Image (cartoon, rainbow, N blue to C red):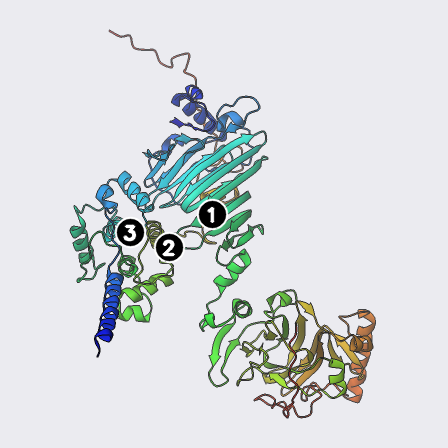
Amino acid sequence: MSSGRRTRRFPLGRLSVLAAGSVAALALSTAARAGLADIGDVSNNAYRPVSPLYLLQDSRPADAGPGAATLPAAPGQPAELVVRVTEVAGVVSASTDGKTWKRVAVGDTYGAGASFRTGMRSAVTCRVGSDQMFTLESLSTMRVEEAVRTGGKEKTDLTMKYGSASYGIEAAGREYDSVIRTPGSTMAIRGTVVRVVDRPGFAPQAESYTGRALFRTAKGVTFVGGGGGYSVASAVQGSAADTALAKTTVDPSIASARTAGENAVVSQQLSQGGVLGFDQRANIPVVRNGSPLPDAALPGALPGRLSFALRWTGNADLNFIVDNQAGPDSTKIILGGFKPTEILFPGYGLNVSTSGGLIPFDNRGGPRGGTEIAYWKGSFPTGVYGVGVLHASGGDASFKINAFLDGQPLPIFTFDAEGNVTRVNTLKGEIGRGGGDGAILFVPRNDLFESIATPGDDQTDPVGDAAARAIAAVKSQATGPKAVATTKAPLSLNPNLKATKMGPSLPAANDAKPAKGR
Amino acid sequence: MTASSRFTFFIACSSLLVLSVAGCTPARVEKPVTTELGGSDPDQQVAFFHKLAETPVTTYDDAFHALLLFTDGDDPSPGYNVRVQTLKQKGMLLKGFNRQANEAVDRGTVALALAKALKVRGGIVYSILPDNGRYATREMEFQGVLPSSSPNQTFSGSEFLAVMARAEDYQKANAGATVGGAGYRPPEMELKQPGKPTGRPVLPGTPAAPAAPAAPSTQPATQPTTQPTEGK
């Protein structure tokens, strides 16, 4: 049956060329050339959910020629692609005018302007031209807006008002411009197999099984797939990465009480096997059995403008401490003696500061270590900050501390083994039972101290400095540590701060008010 | 109490009464879709679902017809009352259900019916209160069949259709068939993974292909293969 009538571009006179018998013969000969042996046996409507009979492993380039899969066209004019029904399950109807619907059977052919709709437990698979196919699933409707071939390029435009459908391109040496439109999304397909779902009440979703597709929703544009395997993007989460991350986490606590940024960090921990709980006594969410965030992911994972991160490997529970003394002149603060007025510690009411600082959870570690963060979301005090780590329980661990301002690393000032002031982007160290370590930094950066401090191995002259540190390390083993004590209290320059399990106690009251950062 | 304050009090009470009554009146539809497309004929079933998708509100009659099509594949009920009785006998409707056919369906009723139809066991609360629309709604949200909902909300036609499609996906998943997701293999994957065994005929010329069948001729034979029998 031929029903290639199109009111827009397809003159009625051409219908005389498309007698049912000639089209059927054309289809049969095409099928024969492609190796389809039993095309006539498929018309029993038996639903085979794995794959339709006709989908053969055709590794040859498409040589069927435009005449087999397209309607005849005048020279220089685009050729209409034939939409041929190759499999039907359940009850499926089609219409060429949107008003009169007829039951669809295998072998039926349509052109652009045809609409399909499926019933319950029904599906229809159609071949568009020779290289493309789509499957419309249950309770769905789709219209073929355009299906043409111009030279070596095929253009297909499908509109799915609601439902779910999959689509694939054989990519046999031609160029394809294929789009699936739904009310909530547009998917541009590049030689791939995709499935798109858009049903009212549920967020549109795009799946890529191979290849890459561009998925555009009200939330934005994202690429789905491209890595060779399965990839999914939801209009709610946005990118395929966000969708995957959201699907890996089950947040048992009150997720709505957290900000989007905190959720991202918590999700990172949970997605790597972490378990989220809550310590009623310490009054803070607790993460266990997570793992340290990788270096590359760290800046993007931190939720605040001013953020600090402690990461460690080793089966230990470490606690992160961040304190600060605010003031417009950080040089003056240092020269006058660093006296922190604000402190963040994971728990016991110290995980939130009056200036807006926050430690959102206490990572109690696990076999792979963990990550703790502290951050100020928007505004933050300027001045001098201290960062420290305390060993709470477990075995030895290797730790790293980083600080970022607006995504850029902040230099951390510490002492090397010889007692020289050193600046590094990542403060690294080893910590054992009962141990602690710390350093200071300036927010914003302090050019004076950066100029007098020796760059660390992640700053300039990495080779020379690394060698110097190695030599210093050997010397320190012989002479004992001078200023950096990995088994003593944190280097906070304030003797009033004591490292205890309950957290450092606040120093004497200071009248200086914290200045707000920009 | 002075006359003016009594009058004010009366007006206030009347307003509250009017508002409360107005708020309790459910939406109604003049003609449910089942009025014209309530039969069991397969083509009529397809037309029913897609006509329903165009309606702004789903009525109880439409919803119950769809539920019976979902559970039984057809609905020979001559009318709404028989549908209600059938669903009550199936345990999908509460015994005390008594809403009108053309009233807007509530999500709690649909959730309860689907939970029974899909044999959802649910969590602790639903297990204890299996006939409660509120917890049935929450359970079906958790199962991904209903979107985020209140049990008193109604459905538009397209939303209800989406829920029926999700119910079908849930049923397929429980039967072992994957629908979507990483484990699903769309038919179009055959275009991309020719090495995977499918049990289907293989194109001649590819490795391990059976002998190609002779291409059917489109031209009539010029020589008869047997001698025609002479007609009498």
Comparing A488 with A139, the one in front is A139
Q: Quadrant of residue B95?
A: bottom left
What x and y, as percent, mark residue A264?
54, 67
The residue drawn where x is 32% and y is 40% is A91
- State left or right for residue B35 relative to residue A450: left
Q: Which is more foreground, mark 1 or mark 3?
A: 3
Q: Nearer the viewer, residue B229 or A280?
A: A280
Instruction: Kindly identify which residue carries mark 3.
Output: B58
- The dot on residue A59 is none
| Whether labels 1 and 3 share one chain | no
- Could you tell me which secondary element the residue under label 1 belongs to? strand
Total marks shown come to 3
Amino acid type, label 3: Thr
Q: Quadrant of the C terminus of chain A?
A: bottom right
Residue pointed to by mark 1: A195
SS at mark 3 in the image: loop
Q: Tell me the chain of label 3.
A: B
Residue B123 is left or right of residue A350, and the answer is left
